[in-house]
């Protein structure tokens, strides 16, 4: 029997060589080629044939790698030990492979000690090693970097030396790219993957690396690229696991399940595949299978903690931050050197408002892995946050740069309190803890606080207990209505809490936008020509597919367009089923049933009737505009603007009014309203100009220029209440415009609303005016009129410190000290400081 088995192996080897036309090829080389192409059974057979020819220990190493790739772990371990026994001083690859195989077992510490021994023995003489041996040293250094982070650099150096020694060592190139990507250095990782593909465009692991790089940059091509790698190597387990992840992120459960099943057919003991299968069970709410899966993994690899890091990461992607914290804690318990889990613990605790313990976890993670860019960025930001000021109320905590917090709090906090009262009453729900609101004047800081990296292209975020907002930049007249955005994000805090962080994106975003529209005229976005053109062209998802627009957008503006479309669906649901159903759906999401089919069924629809229901609503509301956009609207609007530029005001008026009648919902920059307002103002027809601007800002509350112009027209016509209202609205877009604060102060003083006027005068002082003495004098005057004599004296003395010969200030000081007999003047009519006063 023994002799017959030996002949079978040799015969198989000869048949393979004959089929390949390479009888003279080395059996070891043939085995390695088969192994790298994913033909694991053939590789094992060839390695055994090589062993019969006396090729050892390399053949034992290749046999072990082939067996490990198909989940035959015990047999693989035996093969590696045979290689070590045959050449104990030289079997570097076998010793490293054995350590990697054992690193997640109960003897993890001993396995890492053995890897360290390999480094100590072979590192000093690495210059004489082969490329595969250098690659093995890199792999050992990479694993041991959890103990000593300086070994990360050694790993990079060993990979690069392996590539220098053998340019066609594509496995080393891909491993280097993976390591760089792991540390969020995608730029260098991408170069590395492309270099591998330049040498062999059909090398599947390099294509997989490219797909991972594309995923890092949120490029939709990642899935296509990853699938291409599987076309080349169907047994590439890591590619199946990665494709499954992409499907999980898009909630394509069936596709993810299929790829994981295929991966586990190839390697039933693949820990990454088993871990990703656990993610599938978690995201689909199958707790029993998740528990069983985790128990299975613990049985196979009791110290394998990367599965919990993965669960924490994917839970956070699903906005389930509390569960992310819980998973990370288990991962750290299994392996206290799992710095990725420690980083996840810190970042998600920060998202939940636990600033102190979140920072501590990140500090520990950074000591263990100082190359994690997300951790470093976040710690740097936390250092910056320590210099921020905090304003507190019973239900809110506002955190912003010193000066800005005090300036914005009088405007922001009342809106936040009003939003809380509104949502608590509307949903019948109270939040369990005060909300922390963080404002960032630098968008890069906002992005880091949100995801740990720069480059995020949103302006607001809610983690539930914590709300983040971009603060309007000083001096920038932008179209970002921060009050509307705050109302939106506080809505999310309620939605997340009520649904236990399980509300579908389309529902949560659509409801938040709809709530904005209910709160104030012009809030919540307005229907745009781009939205209606996309809808009319069939480019937007139907109601039953709306979640897909948020998970897998097909073009750049699909997500913002889908925000508005989702809000129309929410509007329709409330109109047909009542407001209570919205709160009821939120509560129901906490128990599952978040899929569109389940929601449609609860509302009495099939997916098809759900689609028709929304489509009918959109076309009833905007059918006229969709038709106009497909017809003459753009031509009329463009010709009207051209006529206006040519001073042909009669023709311009006719064309612009005609366009407006076809699509009156189109407001803001680029629409007809501002053009017609300017035309009427130039004619002296102020009333018509005002009506155009009023209609404009009732639709678009972000149009700052329209607000400022309307305020001027109100003042020209003596409509001081209108001017006051408009200035207040303008501050919700740009709170750092000193001229608006000054105008509002004067309007409040006109009606003796000195408390409000004082707020505006303080804002002017906080905005570093060109003439600080004059600004403080005006503040002191308003405080005097409000009866706040001591505060008035304090501000006046500070003004006189800057300009001691300021006549008006000296006059007021005498008045405050009771040494002046003249009656007090209104703050707005007191003398201005002339040049001679300086």
Image: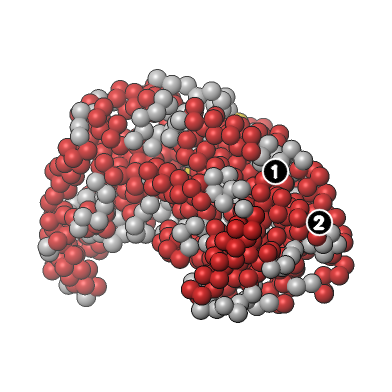
Q: Secondary structure at mark 1?
A: loop
**Residue pointed to by mark 2:** 85
Tell which circle, 2 or 1, labels the residue nearer the N-terminal end: 2
Q: Nearer the viewer, residue 552 or 257?
A: 257
Judge left or right: residue 214 versus residue 349.
left
The C terminus sits in image quarter: bottom right
Determine which quarter of the picture holds residue 635.
bottom left
Residue 813 appearing in the image: no
Q: Is residue 91 above or below residue 264?
A: below
Residue sitting at x 75%, y 63%: 57
Residue sitting at x 21%, y 55%: 538
Q: Nearer the viewer, residue 220 or 612?
A: 220
Q: What is the crowding at mark 1: few (fewer than 14 residues within 10 Å), some, or many (at least 20)?
A: many
Q: Is residue 152 above or below residue 106?
A: below
Determine which quarter of the picture holds residue 193.
bottom right
Q: Nearer the viewer, residue 307 or 766?
A: 307
Residue 80 appearing in the image: yes
Residue sitting at x 48%, y 48%: 265
* Marking on residue 572: none
Residue 704, given in percent of the width and then of the height, sits at 39, 53
Residue sitting at x 60%, y 79%: 24
* Marking on residue 104: 1
How many angstroms separate mark 2 from mark 1 (CA)? 23 Å
Determine which quarter of the picture holds residue 176.
bottom right
């Amino acid at each position: 029997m023994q002799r017959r088995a030996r002949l079978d192996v040799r015969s198989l080897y000869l048949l393979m060589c004959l089929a390949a036309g390479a009888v003279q090829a080395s059996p070891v080389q043939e085995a390695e080629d088969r192994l790298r192409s994913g033909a694991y059974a053939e590789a094992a057979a060839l390695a055994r044939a090589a062993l019969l020819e006396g090729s050892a220990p390399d053949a034992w190493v290749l046999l072990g790698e082939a067996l490990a790739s198909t989940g035959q772990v015990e047999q693989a371990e035996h093969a590696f030990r045979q290689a070590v026994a045959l050449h104990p001083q030289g079997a570097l690859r076998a010793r490293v492979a054995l350590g990697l195989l054992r690193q997640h077992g109960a003897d993890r510490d001993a396995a890492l000690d053995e890897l360290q021994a390999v480094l100590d023995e072979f590192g000093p003489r690495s210059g004489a090693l082969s490329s595969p041996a250098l690659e093995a040293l890199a792999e050992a250094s990479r694993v041991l970097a959890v103990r000593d982070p300086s070994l990360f650099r050694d790993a990079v150096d060993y990979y690069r030396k392996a590539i220098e020694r053998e340019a066609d060592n594509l496995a080393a190139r891909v491993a280097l790219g993976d390591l760089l990507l792991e540390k969020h250095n995608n730029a260098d990782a991408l170069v590395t993957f492309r270099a591998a593909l330049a040498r062999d465009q059909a090398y599947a692991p390099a294509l997989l690396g490219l797909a991972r790089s594309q995923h890092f940059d949120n490029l939709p091509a990642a899935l296509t690229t990853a699938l291409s790698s599987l076309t080349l190597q169907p047994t590439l387990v890591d590619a199946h696991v990665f494709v499954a992840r992409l499907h999980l992120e898009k909630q394509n459960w069936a596709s993810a399940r299929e790829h994981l099943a295929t991966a586990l057919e190839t390697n039933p003991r693949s820990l990454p595949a088993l871990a990703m299968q656990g993610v599938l069970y978690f995201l689909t709410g199958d707790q029993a299978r998740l528990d069983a899966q985790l128990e299975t993994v613990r049985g196979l690899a009791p110290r394998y903690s990367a599965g919990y890091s993965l669960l924490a990461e994917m839970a956070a992607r699903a906005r389930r931050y509390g569960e992310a914290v819980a998973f990370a804690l288990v991962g750290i318990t299994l392996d206290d050197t799992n710095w990725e889990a420690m980083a996840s613990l810190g970042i998600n605790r920060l998202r939940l408002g636990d600033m102190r313990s979140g920072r501590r976890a990140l500090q520990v993670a950074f000591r263990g892995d100082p190359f994690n860019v997300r951790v470093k960025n976040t710690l740097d930001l936390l250092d910056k946050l320590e210099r921020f000021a905090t304003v507190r109320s019973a239900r809110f905590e506002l955190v912003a740069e010193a000066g800005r917090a005090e300036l914005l709090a009088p405007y922001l906090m009342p809106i936040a309190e009003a939003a809380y009262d509104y949502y608590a009453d509307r949903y019948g729900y109270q939040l369990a803890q005060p909300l922390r609101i963080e404002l960032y004047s630098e968008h890069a800081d906002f992005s880091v606080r949100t995801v740990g990296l720069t480059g995020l292209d949103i302006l607001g975020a809610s983690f539930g207990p914590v709300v983040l907002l971009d603060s309007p930049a000083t001096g920038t007249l932008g179209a970002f209505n921060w009050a509307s955005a705050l109302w939106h994000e506080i809505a999310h805090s309620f939605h997340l809490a009520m649904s236990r962080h399980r509300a579908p994106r389309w529902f949560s975003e659509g409801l938040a936008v709809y709530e904005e529209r209910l709160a104030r005229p012009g809030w919540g976005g307005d229907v745009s020509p781009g939205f209606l053109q996309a809808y009319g062209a069939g480019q937007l998802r139907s109601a039953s597919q709306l979640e897909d627009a948020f998970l897998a957008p097909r073009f750049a503006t699909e997500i913002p367009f889908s925000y508005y479309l989702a809000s129309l669906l929410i509007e329709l649901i409330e109109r047909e089923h009542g407001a209570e159903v919205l709160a009821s759906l939120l509560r129901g999401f906490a128990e599952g049933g978040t899929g569109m089919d389940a929601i449609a069924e609860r509302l009495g629809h099939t997916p098809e009737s759900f689609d028709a229901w929304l489509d009918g609503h959109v076309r009833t509301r905007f059918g006229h505009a969709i038709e106009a956009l497909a017809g003459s609207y753009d031509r009329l609007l463009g010709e009207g603007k051209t006529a206006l530029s040519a001073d042909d005001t009669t023709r311009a008026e006719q064309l612009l009014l005609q366009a407006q009648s076809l699509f009156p919902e189109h407001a803001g920059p680029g629409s007809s309203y501002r053009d017609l307002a300017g035309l009427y103002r130039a004619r002296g027809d102020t009333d018509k100009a005002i009506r155009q601007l009023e209609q404009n800002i009732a639709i678009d509350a972000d149009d700052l220029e329209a607000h400022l112009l309307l305020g001027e027209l109100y003042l020209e016509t003596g409509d001081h209440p209108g001017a006051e209202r408009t200035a207040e609205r303008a501050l919700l877009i740009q709170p750092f415009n000193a001229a608006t604060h000054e105008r509002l102060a004067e309007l409040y003083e006109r009606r003796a609303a000195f408390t409000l006027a004082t707020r505006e005068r303080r804002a002017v002082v906080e905005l570093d005016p060109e003439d600080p003495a004059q600004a403080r004098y005006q503040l002191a005057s308003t405080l005097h009129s409000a009866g706040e004599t001591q505060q008035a004296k304090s501000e006046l003395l500070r003004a006189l410190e800057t300009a001691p010969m300021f006549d008006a200030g000296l006059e007021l000081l005498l008045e405050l000290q009771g040494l002046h007999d003249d009656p007090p003047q209104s703050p707005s009519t007191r003398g201005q400081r002339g040049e001679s006063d300086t």
